[in-house]
């Protein structure tokens, strides 16, 4: 077999490998694997070789979808933002309801958010300016949505801001509190806290 034939066969083999990898590993599978790696090991754990091994495919599948690791990281964060902001708002707004009912639905959805990923993105943002800027935008969007609901029954802008901040802080911060609650479960206490936020007074 001459060199030209070998090169041609190698080229065909590479194209087949990329096509097979594309079929076996849809784009969202790489994203999911990247987010899991981020949650367990931080951004340094998001390595193409490790993701390919996790998915039991070759690296060719990754490069079929993504030109580079930075491009992948950007899309991974795009997917996370969509999941925790756009998709959540879409679900909350999917049924006609008053602002309190929407907030109740929002609080319920907050409990299903993968907190490990949330915390990993926040830790990443402490070391990376671009991630910090993105996180600020995401948090601004979340706060804006909270405000839009609270202001429908709270006439005082200061009250709206305080309730929005307290709701957001409960979502993030309650996971760091190790205290017991006098026989109440954490879920019961959070429910009581959210009830206070939805009250008229």
Image (cartoon, rainbow, N blue to C red):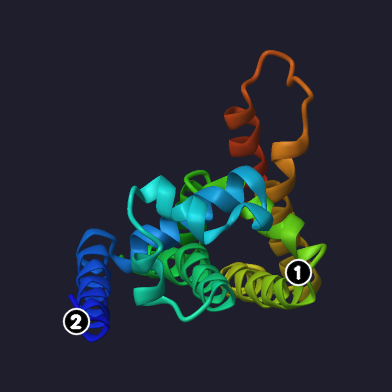
Residue occupying the far bottom of the picture: 4
Left or right: where does residue 32 sit relative to residue 189? left
Marker disc for residue 137 = none
Q: Residue 70 occupies which quadrant of the picture? A: bottom right
Image coords of residue 30 (percent x, y)? 40, 61
Q: Is residue 51 left or right of residue 168?
A: left
**Tag 2's secondary structure?**
helix
- Displayed quadrant of residue 153: bottom right
Q: Is residue 126 left or right of residue 137?
A: right
Q: Is residue 198 left or right of residue 79?
A: right
Report the residue marked by disc 1.
161
Q: Name the residue that disc number 2 marks.
A: 5
- The kind of secondary structure element at disc 1 is helix
Q: Residues within 10 Å of mark 1 (few under 14, many from 20)?
A: some
* Residue drawn at point x = 75 percent, y = 20 percent: 180
The answer to which of 76 and 57 lies nearer the viewer is: 57
> How much space separates mark 2 and mark 1, taking CA atoms?
69 Å
Q: In the rendering, at what x and y percent does residue 28 appear?
A: 35, 64
* Point 20% across, 65% down: residue: 20
Mark yes or no: residue 26 visible. yes
Q: Mark 2 or mark 1: name the one nearer the start of the chain.
A: 2
Q: Nearer the viewer, residue 155 or 167?
A: 167
- The residue depicted at 50 percent of the width and 56 percent of the height is 49
């Amino acid at each position: 077999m001459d060199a030209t034939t070998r090169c041609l066969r190698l080229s065909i083999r590479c194209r087949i490998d990329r096509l097979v990898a594309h079929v076996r590993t849809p784009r969202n599978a790489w994203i999911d694997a990247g987010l899991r790696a981020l949650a367990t090991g931080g951004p340094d754990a998001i390595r193409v070789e490790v993701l390919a091994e996790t998915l039991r495919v070759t690296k060719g599948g990754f490069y079929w979808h993504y030109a580079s690791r930075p491009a992948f990281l950007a899309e991974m964060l795009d997917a996370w933002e969509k999941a925790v902001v756009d998709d959540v708002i879409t679900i909350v707004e999917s049924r006609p309801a008053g602002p309190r009912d929407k907030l109740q639905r929002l609080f319920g959805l907050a409990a299903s958010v993968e907190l490990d990923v949330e915390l990993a993105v926040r830790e990443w943002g402490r070391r990376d300016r671009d991630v910090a800027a993105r996180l600020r935008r995401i948090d601004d969007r979340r706060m804006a949505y909270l405000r839009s609901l609270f202001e429908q029954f709270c006439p005082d802008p200061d009250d709206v801001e305080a309730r929005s901040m307290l709701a957001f802080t409960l979502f993030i911060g309650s996971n760091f509190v190790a205290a017991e609650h006098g026989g109440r479960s954490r879920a019961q206490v959070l429910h009581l806290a959210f009830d206070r936020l939805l009250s008229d007074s």
